[in-house]
Image (tube, rainbow, N blue to C red):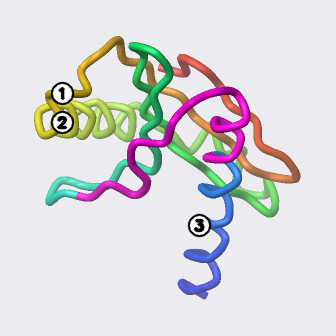
């Protein structure tokens, strides 16, 4: 079950990365990890850097993917973004947080929080 979920998540992240690339963004990092957690996707276009949380779903039985990005998850992603920026000081720019929901297609909520 965990392996299936991991594969589904990886497929959703790849689809989301493609979505950004098709719109002129460059992928800086995928699945960036540190002791405090993981950032699914970091992309850049011009001076803007986006930290994107990807939620892949086969069903909305447990609620939509966007609902899974709780205030606690948002706070954790903000902390992780600060750590990422500290370790990539050459990449500093305006920051935005997006949420991508992958079901039958990719839907990106830009500036989600």
- The residue at 26%/58% (across/down) is 33
The percent position of residue 86, horizontal first and vertical second, equals: 11, 33
**Residue 23 is inside the magenta segment:** yes
Circle 2 packing at 10 Å, graded few (<14), some (14-19), many (20+), is few
Q: Earlier in the sequence, mark 1 or mark 3?
A: 3
Give SS at disc 1.
helix
Q: Which residue is mark 3?
A: 10
Residue 7 shown left or right of residue 15 in the figure: left
The span picked out in magenta is: 17-33
Q: Residues within 10 Å of mark 1 (few under 14, many from 20)?
A: few
Tag 2–tag 1 contact (CB < 8 Å) = yes
Between residue 28 and residue 97, name the one nearer to us: 28
Mark nearer the N terminus (2 vs 3): 3
Which quadrant would residue 11 be assigned to in this image? bottom right
| Residue bearing the label numbered 1 | 90
C-beta proximity under 8 Å, tags 2 and 3: no
| Callout in the foreground (2, 3) | 2
Q: Secondary structure at mark 3?
A: helix
On residue 88, the disc is 2
- Residue 15: image tag: none
- The front one of 49 and 112 is 49
Give how far across and how far down residue 28 sits, in percent: 40, 42
Q: Which picture quadrant has residue 9? A: bottom right
In depth, the one of 21 and 8 nearer the eye is 21
Q: Residue at x 24, y 40 (%)?
A: 80
Q: Residues within 10 Å of mark 3 (few under 14, many from 20)?
A: some
Residue 44 position, x and y percent, is 45, 28
Q: Nearer the viewer, residue 105 or 94?
A: 94
* 61 vs 69: above or below: below
């Amino acid at each position: 079950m965990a392996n299936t979920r991991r594969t589904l998540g990886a497929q959703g992240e790849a689809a989301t990365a493609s979505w950004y690339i098709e719109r002129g963004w460059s992928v800086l990092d995928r699945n960036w990890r540190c002791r405090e957690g993981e950032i699914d996707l970091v992309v850049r276009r011009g001076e803007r850097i986006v930290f994107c949380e990807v939620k892949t779903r086969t069903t909305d039985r447990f609620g939509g993917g966007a609902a899974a990005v709780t205030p606690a998850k948002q706070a954790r992603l903000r902390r992780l973004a600060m750590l990422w920026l500290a370790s990539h000081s050459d990449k500093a720019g305006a920051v935005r947080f997006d949420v991508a929901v992958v079901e039958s297609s990719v839907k990106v909520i830009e500036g989600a929080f």
